[in-house]
Amino acid sequence: MAAMELFEERGFEATTVADIAARAGLTKRTFFRYFADKREVLFSGTDALRETFVAGVAAAPADDCPLDAIAAGLDAMADLFAEFGEHPRRRQAIIAANPELQERELIKMNAYAAAGAGALRERGVAEPGASLAAEAGLAVFRFAFEQWTSGEEGQDLHALIEHGLTELKSVAQSS
Amino acid sequence: MAAMELFEERGFEATTVADIAARAGLTKRTFFRYFADKREVLFSGTDALRETFVAGVAAAPADDCPLDAIAAGLDAMADLFAEFGEHPRRRQAIIAANPELQERELIKMNAYAAAGAGALRERGVAEPGASLAAEAGLAVFRFAFEQWTSGEEGQDLHALIEHGLTELKSVAQSS
């Protein structure tokens, strides 16, 4: 993707929409038909991802505990990421280099947690349990995703999520 | 506080730094000696609060599980809030009405979670457990704090936190 290449070559801040449009062979006007600003190039897939997550939570076995239902949604996202090749790793490196993009990512993740809590309430989970399970589950995802994108290649995102969930359950156990 | 009154009367967006300075009997220059911008009026106390939280985690009994050590930090914050009278409730109403301020609050809370994870690592808790316990604990705090500031007056913030922690532990239990 033209924009990703430019962000990698020049840095996110130094890249202009005009640069991106020129590299992609588009007019600026066409660019703005698809994206509100250059940040959106990096976040355009997040709505689809959130829907995948919510559908995964909804489809979890009825007797799953709330956190395990969230985990089913996280696994559905991980399935999708597995199809994206190098893209998530490249995208994450761009985001990690820019505090403004990190904030935006955090805000998107918060929206995922809110959507996950909604999906749990649909399953009959009461508050505050629904929100807490969703937020804790998203914390697991963020940690696993960061390891997956910044660590050695060839790691399994599902296994990292599973490990995080086990850890989360264990830190909540009184010794 | 002059700024809070103005935010309540006119809304956060419609209030200018010149308005705040005039109401407080200050020059704009003096205002900017203390605050980088008008948002900072609402967030100037957060560093002190984060230090209280971290000190509370550090001082928790050595045999507390990681989540209970985080809970000790949350209780230390709750002690502090109890001394602030009406201020937290008024501040929260202003933040709840403005998406930009909500985002800033979320980013501050994320910094608290990072600081709490650091305090747990000092206690010998390994990652990802330290980060997950801290993020899950802060999710409990956010939910409790929102109930405390938006619900009926006279609720006990400590009891709301305790309830959230119990709920968090229960959503992670497989049925």
Image (tube, coloured by chain):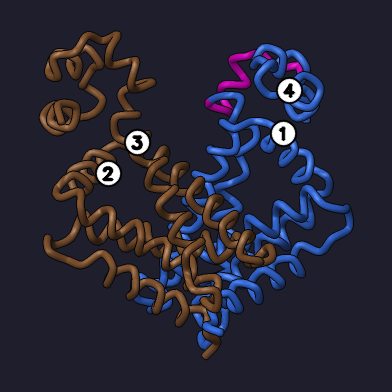
Chain colours: A blue, B brown
Which quadrant does the N terminus of chain A fall into?
A: top right
> Distance between the Cα atoms at labels 4 and 1?
8 Å
Q: Which residues are magenta?
A: A25-36
Kindly check if marks 1 and 3 are in contact, taking CB atoms under 8 A apart as contact: no
Q: Earlier in the sequence, mark 3 or mark 2?
A: 3
Q: CA distance from mark 1 to mark 3?
A: 28 Å
Pick the residue in front: A107 or B118. B118
Question: Is there any visible trace of residue A69 in the rendered image?
Answer: no
Residue topped by disc 3 = B43
Residue A85, percent across and down? Answer: 83, 49
Q: Pick whichever of labels 4 and 1 is earlier in the sequence.
A: 4
Asked if residue B104 is positioned above or below residue A63 in the image, the reply reads: above
Task: Return the chain for callout 1.
Answer: A
The residue that label 4 is drawn on is: A11
Subunit ID for the residue under disc 4:
A
Residues under labels 3 and 4: Cα distance? 30 Å
Q: Is residue A133 left or right of residue B141?
A: right
**Pointer 1: what residue?**
A94
Coordinates of residue B138 in the picture (x, y in percent): 44, 59
Mark 1 closeness class: few <14, some 14–19, many ≥20 residues within 10 Å: some
Q: Are marks 2 and 4 in contact (CB under 8 Å)?
A: no
Mark 4–mark 1 contact, CB under 8 Å? no
Mark 3: which secondary structure?
Answer: helix
Give x and y (percent) for residue A37.
56, 24
User: Closer to us: mark 3 or mark 4?
Assistant: 3
Q: Quadrant of residue A87?
A: top right
- Assess whether mark 1 and mark 2 are in contact (beta carbons under 8 angstroms): no
Q: Which residue is mark 2?
A: B96
